[in-house]
Image: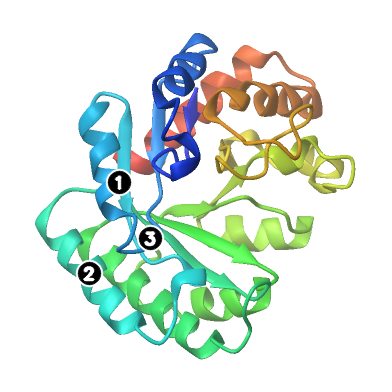
Amino acid sequence: MIDTHTHLYLPEFAQDIDAVIERAQAVGVHEFYLPAIDSTTTKAMYALAERFPKHMRLMMGLHPTSVQENFQAELDHVYKELSRRSFCAVGEIGIDLYWQRDTLAWQQEAFAQQIKWAQEFNLPIVIHCRESFDEIFDVLDAVKGPMPKGIFHCFTGTLEQANHIIGLGLSLGIGGVATFKNGKIDQFLAQIPMKHIVLETDSPYLAPVPFRGKRNESSYLYHIAQRVAGIYDCPLTEVDQVTTANAHALFTS
């Protein structure tokens, strides 16, 4: 299995990262895709990738909650890094109106600019969306030129929104929310062909049931995959095979 979204380089894992990786591998998770946050976490992300080069895949981007008054300098950092080394995606990028609404114009500008860089470097995008579906669709629907492939990370929307995303050629990132009683996406996910989804944890956040409220980690992808298998009424092995193939096609082609 592939964890397409995990922040294993954050301080929450500083004391036991080797054990975290071992537990993930023990349940069949062997690839870890690391989304960037901002310039303050770049060094730690690179260090983790250097420590586990066969298993870590790096993204570069500016997280929307890090879009503040200095966002132009942060964007300069993103472009510099994209220009000097290889990445699997531009991410995570997007719009977050849960934490801060007064930076919307800056977030929109940063999001649109990073999509252009994804086009320039021929990379997929990984999108963060929180209370901002309409605003994100406004940016995506205005994209000129080929839409990059990508993932709507931690999808929590409606069936209508899911179909809009799929219509743009993007995939749905399914994580711990699928295991929540109030997560809602379990009510319609089976109506979406599995070829449009990938699995993620968003560690250390959004731990699935039965670990909800605790630190999330990539080994818990197994519980997310189990829930997805239940929703689709199919074997766990099928979820593993299909979502792994989906992720490889998205990130490597």
The tag earlier along the polypeptide, 2 or 1, is: 1
Residue in the picture at 35% in, 67% down: 146
Dot 1: element: helix
State the residue position of label 1.
44
Q: Amino acid at mark 2?
A: His
State the residue position of label 2.
77
Is residue 182 shown above or below 239? Answer: below
Decide which of 75, 48 is in the foreground and name it: 48
Residue in the picture at 60% in, 60% down: 165
Residue 164 at x, y percent in the picture: 65, 63
Q: Quadrant of residue 46?
A: top left
Q: Is residue 104 left or right of residue 148?
A: right
Q: Amino acid at mark 3?
A: Pro
Dot 2: element: helix
Residue 209 at x, y percent in the picture: 78, 31
The tag earlier along the polypeptide, 3 or 1, is: 1
Residue in the picture at 45% in, 18% down: 19
Q: Is residue 96 left or right of residue 111?
A: right
Is the residue marked by circle 1 packed among few (<14), some (14-19), or many (20+) residues within 10 Å? some
Q: Is residue 88 visible?
A: no
On residue 148, which mark appears?
3
Dot 3: element: loop
Residue 143 at x, y percent in the picture: 42, 77
